[in-house]
Amino acid sequence: MPAYQKTYAEMKRNFEENIACLKRGGTTAFVRAPIMSTTETVIMGQSQLIQHYNALNYYEENDEKVLVKYNFIQRWLHDPARRTVCNVVCEPDNTDRTVMNIWMPFRASRFDAVVQPEQILNKILGFASSAYDNADELLRFFAYTVQYPNTKLPYILAIVGDDWYTSSILVHFFGQMVVGPYLYKRLYKFESKERIGQKLLSVDSAQNAMAVKEIWGEYMTPGHSSNDTTWFIQNKANIIMTTDETFEDENFRVIQCTKNALNLTQIESYLNSTIAARCFYDYLMLMNLPTLP
């Protein structure tokens, strides 16, 4: 049989790597995990599933030994052994087949390794040192969340500066190029002080900033189930806050922007490269860190 003419078992094995029937709280839907760092997790009803995958076919021989084409999705929908999950998670170490794990590797980990990264790293670290008074704190924050992605840090990172562009440029590079946009919005929340304040007002005044982190610990999945049920997926968001006001609070680690940042236009162009992202990722993964705070 030609390679493109797959049997039902072969089609099913490939199909269920990213798609499963999701049953939770008496409701049935279908979940599609992302297949690359720029796609999204989608929850859909049966009609949407059929619309998306009705063109899939498998091949089997009939009684006369003639290869016949059959519709895959119709058979899969009625297959009692189809993959069925009870939840959706975003966890790097979870291999439980009864849940759909939408975790994806960090984007930069898929880029080619750089043989001599020193010159590139020196430019990134040099910019960080010029832009932030305590750049080491920011680098440790990045390193902790890359080395321990399944752990929430017990504080909110606050970047203080008059220029939002300078405050955010290294965070943007880290989120888009190193982590990747798909994981970035699940592992981090990059918010203004005003947005953080709105969340603080919504929790009991006796609670500290950890209550805010728990509020942001879930997000709504895109798409709709067959009966418009809202689905939530637990995540472990770490919060990065920007503000132009200096302050002290035990629930925050404050990083102060300087007025001495190197040429921003030049560094932004430089940071928009896969080589810089891979060098920075390897640096963070190898950083020697003390015990988790």
Image (cartoon, grey):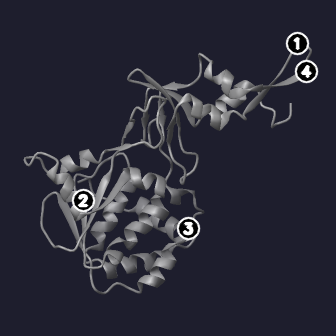
x 56%, y 28%: residue: 46
Disc marking residue 195:
2
- Marks 1/3: CA–CA distance: 54 Å
Which amino acid, by three-letter code, is at mark 3? Thr
- Choose between 212 and 106: the one closer to the eye: 212
Residue at far left of view: 206
Residue at far top of view: 63
Secondary element at tag 1: loop
Residue 265 position (above or below residue 216): below
Label 3 or label 2, whichever comes before in sequence order: 2
- Marks 1/2: CA–CA distance: 66 Å
Which of the two marks, 3 or 4, is nearer to us in this view?
4
Label 1 or label 3, whichever comes before in sequence order: 1
Tag 1–tag 3 contact (CB < 8 Å): no
Which of the two marks, 4 or 2, is nearer to us in this view?
2
Q: Residue 279 at what x, y percent from top left?
A: 50, 68
Label 4 sits on residue: 66
Which amino acid, by three-letter code, is at mark 4? Val
